[in-house]
Amino acid sequence: MKKRMKGAVADRAAHHGDHVEINGPWPLDTPFRIGDLEIPNRVIQAPLAGIANAPFRVQAQRHGAGLSVSEMVASMGVHHGNARTVDMLRLDPQEALTGIQLFGADPAAMAEAARVAEANGASLIDINMGCPVPKICKTGAGAALLADPVHGASLVAACVDAVKVPVTVKIRRGLTPGESQPVEVAKRLVDAGAAAVTIHPRAAAEEYRGSADHRITAELVAALDVPVIASGDINTPRRAYEVFTDTGAAAVMIGRAGLGDPWIYGAMASGHSSARPDLEGVIDEVIAFVHLNIALMGERRGVHYLRKFYPWYFVGENVAQSQIAKLLVTEEVDGVLAQLSDIAHASALATASGLN
Ligand SMILES: Cc1cc2nc3c(=O)[nH]c(=O)nc-3n(C[C@H](O)[C@H](O)[C@H](O)COP(=O)(O)O)c2cc1C
């Protein structure tokens, strides 16, 4: 598992059943608007590159996310007609509310990709201004735009002119903690037409180190007259409640906590402790997810793509490493399904014999 995932996913067991008692109704279970778009609750599934494809989004929404945002899509890839990139702009018919996130630095290419995404049914267009990856930043896209908010604003304006759905922006606090001017940057983006701003309040240079400083989220809430969405280290219903109420944000966005734990969206939206089922229920969910991904991308690509998800689903579960390891080398979908059944079967036997 990669370093940025390890803490976030592995903490899950520690937080499970973490329940919040509050007086009155749970405030995240209320609708809100981004422009003309009504979103049924305050829990948003985060854009996650290489992860938040249509099956992931369908699953997040089925479990209670009020809105999903796609993995980031290269506007230049759309412009050049790259088939895989164009496919990433497609939605599944089961998706209710999904934003498509675009990255790029060329206003015409961003507008063109925004038009295609809107025609495909995107509920909103989100512009990535937070990705710290050097390959993206050196093209002037992602977090590089935080250092050039005038250009960032021109991308927003180009997309706003191109589509009727709301255009939103996702930022980090700045390139480095010292150079951060998130309020000034966000104000420019809103002046250019951004209908909401999501902030992940770490600097790009910090990647995933330290913790997200949601005092910055609160500063944005105070300064902007559009909804502000809080992203970063929100991994339990309790934390969702705290960030939501402490900052005044319109919604919380959930990234790593949703990996292998789609039940977390509903837990946060309802305030109940997670409805994560027993291992057999988890495996039913994994099997449904396998089928959706194989249908989308075919057996060979799908089987390889799915491998990163298994360790996330089984963290904290009573599954032997050797059983997970077998899933990571199986080449056919039938083999994957058989191995998942074996894991479920072993768990059922252990339960019956009182070993679990
Ligand atoms: C694997 C991975 C991929 C990500 N991809 C994107 C992306 O494509 N676009 C984006 O705006 N943020 C992306 N992020 C950042 C997340 O959306 C989120 O802001 C960040 O992980 C902090 O939230 P969390 O603590 O809930 O994960 C990614 C994060 C991770 C871990």
Image (cartoon, rainbow, N blue to C red):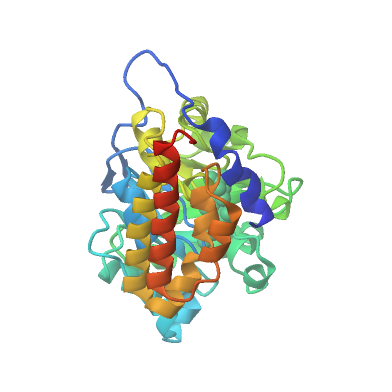
Image spot of residue 279 (x, y percent): 42, 44
Q: Could you say which is closer to the camera, residue 91 or residue 59?
A: 59
Residue 47 higher or lower than 337, as above or below: above
Image spot of residue 11 (x, y percent): 60, 38
Kindly give the residue lying farthest to the right in the view shown: 178
Ligand 1's quadrant:
bottom right
Q: Residue at x 31, y 62 (%)?
A: 122
Residue 78 in view here: no
173 relative to 205 in the view: left or right: left
Residue 294 higher or lower than 129, as above or below: below
Image spot of residue 207 (x, y percent): 68, 53
Rendered-image quadrant of the N terminus: bottom right
207 relative to 260 in the view: left or right: right
Q: Could you say which is closer to the camera, residue 347 or residue 14?
A: 347
Q: Could you say which is closer to the camera, residue 291 or residue 84?
A: 291
Kindly give the residue lying farthest to the left in the view shown: 93
Residue 233 higher or lower than 96, as above or below: above
Q: Residue at x 51, y 49 (%)?
A: 314
Q: Residue at x 44, y 82 (%)?
A: 79
Number of marks in the rendered image? 0
Residue 117 higher or lower than 273, as above or below: below
Q: Could you say which is closer to the camera, residue 80 or residue 24?
A: 24
Kindly give the residue lying farthest to the top in the view shown: 23
Image spot of residue 337 (x, y percent): 38, 64
Residue 131 in view here: yes
